[in-house]
Amino acid sequence: MNLHKKIGASGAIGLGLGLAVLASATLPATASDSDGFARDSVAANSAAFGIQNNVLARGLTESPVAYGQLPLANPHGGVSHYGFNTANGGPLTQDPHEAFKTEPDKNVYLVFGGVHYLYQGHEGGPQGYVTRVNLDEKDPAKRVTLIADARSDGAAVPNFDGITWDPFTKQLLLTAESAAPKGGVFAVGLDAKGDPLDGKLIPLPALGSGGYEGVQNDSAGNVWLVEDIGGAKASGGKVPNSYIYRFTPTTPTDLSGGKLEALQVSTKAGTPVTAKQLSANPSDPFITDLHTYGASFSTRWVTVTPGADNGATAAAAAAGATPFKRPENGVFRPGTKFGEFYFTETGDTDKTSTLPGAFGAVFRLSQSSPSAKTGTLSPAFLGDLTHTGLDNIQFQTPDKLLVVEDAGDTLHTQRDALDSGYLIDVSRKGSKAPVATRWLAEGRDASATYDHFTSPGYNDGDNEITGIHVSNGDPSTSGILGAQAPKAFTDGWRTFWTQQHGDNITWELHQSAQHD
């Protein structure tokens, strides 16, 4: 079966209720439009009611490249499907004892020997694992391969969230978003054909243990980590509790040793802002200043020395680093020689929060080089009730940044609106808010709707937008995200995103003029 054509460019896989097909609505395109993300933006989020279709901006269409019920070509025990772990013996969808949703998360697109692959870690179910989608394979039974589901040291495999390709070590780097000692970074080596060397997940203790989510390389071989651990509840919201890290390996081709640092931000008066300070006062004026357009703060990197449990979070606090309100993912801006790093801050994901910074932001860290000791931090975009839960992030052009939401079921209900994806122009810096153009209003498929109202307790509810990824698949150091100016939909550049939870569909985006 030709999966690409059989499922269709505008169809979703409604696997939940009677195998219904849910169409993705797309506004009609005009041939003169050149940027599918910016054509006649979607007017509003989808309402948090029943089953909803995805709605794309005019000029965009999408086709599924993988979905939850696709069987793995090489299953191992309960690791049996792209989006399900059947270790509990439950059926795949819509049953009080349904199988565990595995939630394929962030995407990495790579081309090896002319074959086009999409790699993902899985963050749900009883354990994590790594899959590879062969985008050229037309037989669904052969399309998805299990890459790794066991650790090299024989210990339990954690769930995985972030993923990137490290061309220096020729490894996929995956992050486990858990507090120490379970969280951290793991590696899977690939050969020149894109196949796993031995199928083992190798722990990288030198990078510390923490609730890492975002992971990204720079041109110097450093590994940047963005941590997402929710802080303690305070009056009116949550305390900032997560950090931005940079790991400098002793040798770029070997991540077994090196220096771990965390970002420290200083007030306008030059005083470092610490965890102790923000914990004592979650309404500290600094947080308001930080979330003000036009503001700029000095930064420096402080050395982190994890303790007995290799915990990076506590060590970052002890080193005087500055915590944020759940930063999640980061990426380098093309054309800056890895001198500008943008990262999202999710915020409290609660309409009732009254603390400053409650709705998150996108921050810009500017440095003279990726290895520089100091820099400046400023807000590039500030969240509000309509634009919040900011999560995955990716440059679509050197000036246009794609940012997607993960607001969560509670906030969906509070604002009666599901998640959206936005395009933000970051070229204009100053005291005015940039325009956020909505290119995607995510819907809610039948399986996610079932989970929302009848969850067995171990599967998530509403769909979430994750894995936004723009790449030409270059596995060399020249292909590190940020090294080249993206050319979405042309010259081999491809764009993917994952509609996590529910049917767990991973989509490829297309310009409709090219794909009708």
Image: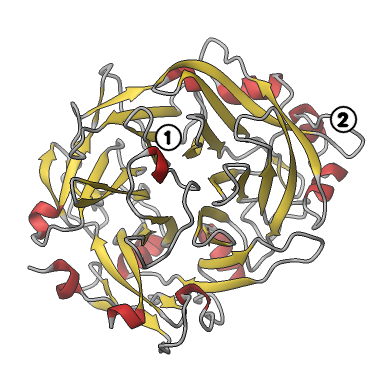
In-image side of 301 versus 282 (left or right) = left
Whole-percent x, y for residue 367 in the image? 68, 38
Q: Earlier in the sequence, mark 2 or mark 1?
A: 1
Quadrant containing the N terminus in the rendered view: bottom left
Quadrant containing the C terminus in the rendered view: bottom left
Which quarter of the picture shows residue 297? top right
Say what amino acid the circle numbered 2 marks: Thr
Say what amino acid the circle numbered 1 marks: Thr
In-image side of 121 versus 360 (left or right) = left
Q: Nearer the viewer, residue 495 or 156?
A: 495
**SS at badge 1:** strand
Which numbered disc covers residue 175?
Answer: 1
Whole-percent x, y for residue 488 in the image? 42, 65
Other-residue count near label 1 (Cα within 10 Å), few / some / many at <14 / 14–19 / ≥20: many
Q: Is residue 41 depicted above or below 391 in this figure?
A: below
Q: Nearer the viewer, residue 288 or 238?
A: 288
Mark 2 highlights which residue? Answer: 271
Whole-percent x, y for residue 211 in the image? 51, 33
Q: Is residue 386 depicted above or below 204 in this figure?
A: below
Whole-percent x, y for residue 485 in the image? 49, 56
Q: Residue at x 42, y 72 (%)?
A: 443
Other-residue count near label 2 (Cα within 10 Å), few / some / many at <14 / 14–19 / ≥20: few
